[in-house]
Image (tube, grey):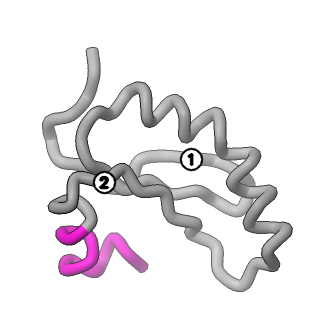
Amino acid sequence: MLRYRETETAALLGANVRAFVLTSGNLRADQMVEAFVKALPGMQRLLRKVTGPFVARVTRGGKADLLLAPKKGMRE
């Protein structure tokens, strides 16, 4: 899992990206699409709320939440 791989997470955060990763494996393409479509409102909320780099997860059920972020970067 990404959160346990320091090199990968450091690269994402160091590149100043806001990344969304699907945490469920072995899904068909249509199931992946469904998860991201359901998660879109939560993804948009995170994009408005968190300014800096972050890694957020998208679950199979369509929930999006923050996994990793530097301490700074939250909007008021």
Can you give x and y, in whole percent of width and height, for residue 75 in the image? 27, 21
Can you give x and y, in whole percent of width and height, for residue 76 in the image? 27, 14
Q: Is residue 24 left or right of residue 73?
A: right
- Magenta residues, start to end: 1-11
Q: Is residue 6 magenta?
A: yes
Which residue is rendered at x = 50% and y = 64% of the image?
Answer: 21
Determine which of the numbered discs, if any, sits on residue 17 in the image: 2
**Residue type at mark 2?**
Val
Q: Where 53 falls versus 49 (above or below)?
A: below
- Of 58 and 17, which appears nearest the observer? 17
**Given this view, does label 2 or label 1 mark the residue nearer the observer?**
2
Q: How many marks?
A: 2
Which residue is rendered at x = 28% and y = 33% of the image?
Answer: 51
Which residue is rendered at x = 25% and y = 29% of the image?
Answer: 74
Q: Where 36 falls versus 4 (above or below)?
A: above
Label 1: which residue? 64
